[in-house]
Image (cartoon, rainbow, N blue to C red):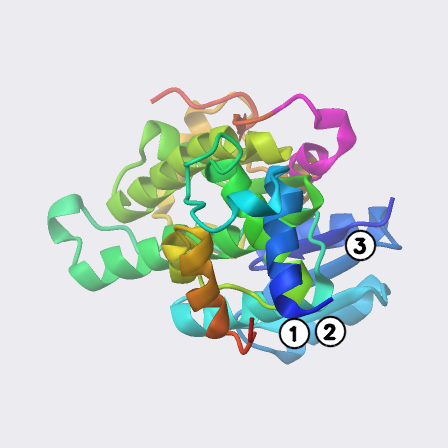
Amino acid sequence: MARTIFITGSNRGIGFAVLNKFSKKEQDSKIIAHARIETPEFLEKLASLKNNNIEPVYFDLLDTENLKKQVSAIIKSYKKIDVLINNAGVVKAPKSFLMCDENTLRETFEINFFAQVFITQLITRAMIRNNSGAIVNLASVAGISGIEGQFEYVASKSAVIGMTKRLAIELAPYKIRVNAVAPGMTDTEMMSNMENNLREKLLSNSISKRLAQPDEIADVIYFLTSVESSYINGQILTVNGGGYVF
Amino acid sequence: MDNLKKYNQAFIDTFRISEDQLQNLQYQSIEAWDSVGHMSLIAALEDAFDIMFETDDIIDFSSYQKGKELIAKYDVQL
């Protein structure tokens, strides 16, 4: 069945892996691929997907007013949105809680949490109209167990987890499922913000002893939007290769 | 169908009520107009008039009469 899918932060990392997954599996579906700005690299990646049903959209998640305008325009244009992947996120350089400045804290929450809230608030209105939908939020194992030196990231991802659970309850009457994926350490650019000694420590304590590939996370996200996961709702699915022992 | 009829019909269809119940109808004054019914009503009105309500207006939409005021902001004359 052809669907309309909206993916935020689809230009790199897990987001691009998700875009790639949907692009290959759903040739007839419309895919709205968000990125902050148009870049030659993103356009090149889109061209490589060889899927004419992808529409790139560009807006900054820090500009809430414009975000609302853009998402409203998408809803007006498509009417029906079946799937929302709230992927876009940011992780800043590690600092201890006492060294965490207000700007870093606010910006991280703006992108990792508030932008997702506002996008979801609008997109669910299109889903309510069709009495169906699947939302997958990108949480993180950091939001469950905490991680050294990234207070604002941990806190924002915990907020995403709370949002997921609450929305699953609130949107169930409209047959909209809301789940989250909590990836462990994944081989993306974001990892470059993790200090090497912390990365080595976490890897050595992990069962799989390796990073996840973005495609392995995308597989789980795709599954959570499919009919095969129709009875999974309000869950935080940890995808961390078997876990870490702190 | 004129706009007032379309406006009324959205309430009648969403809440399965009769036209004579509309004038004093308020949010949560009947079982069907709960938070779930509220969003269904908003969707019905958006479809009927091809508009998109601001979130603040969805929150303020507390009665049949108040809705008439709010919908005027979207160039819908009832």
Residue B29 on the magenta segment: no
What residue would you read off at disc 2?
A44
The kind of residue tagged 2 is Glu
Q: How many marks?
A: 3
- At label 3, counting other C-alpha atoms closer than 10 Å, the crowd grade (few under 14, some 14-19, many 20 or more) is many
Left or right of B61 on screen, residue A71: right
- The quadrant of the rendering that contains the N terminus of chain A is top right
What residue would you read off at disc 1?
A41
- At label 2, counting other C-alpha atoms closer than 10 Å, the crowd grade (few under 14, some 14-19, many 20 or more) is few
From the viewer's side, name the closer residue of A240 and A22: A22
Residue at 53 percent across and 33 percent down: it is: B32
From the viewer's side, name the closer residue of A164 and A220: A164
Q: Which residues are magenta?
A: A220-232
Tell me which chain the residue with mark 1 is part of: A
Tell me which chain the residue with mark 3 is part of: A
Left or right of A56 on screen, residue B55: left
The kind of residue tagged 3 is Ser
Residue at 38 percent across and 60 percent down: it is: B56
Horizontal and vertical percent position of residue B15? 59, 39
**Marks 2 and 1, Cα distance to the nearest angstrom?**
5 Å
- At label 1, counting other C-alpha atoms closer than 10 Å, the crowd grade (few under 14, some 14-19, many 20 or more) is few
What residue would you read off at disc 3?
A23
- Where on the picture, by quarter, is residue B6? bottom right
**Most frequent secondary structure within the magenta stretch:** helix
The kind of residue tagged 1 is Glu
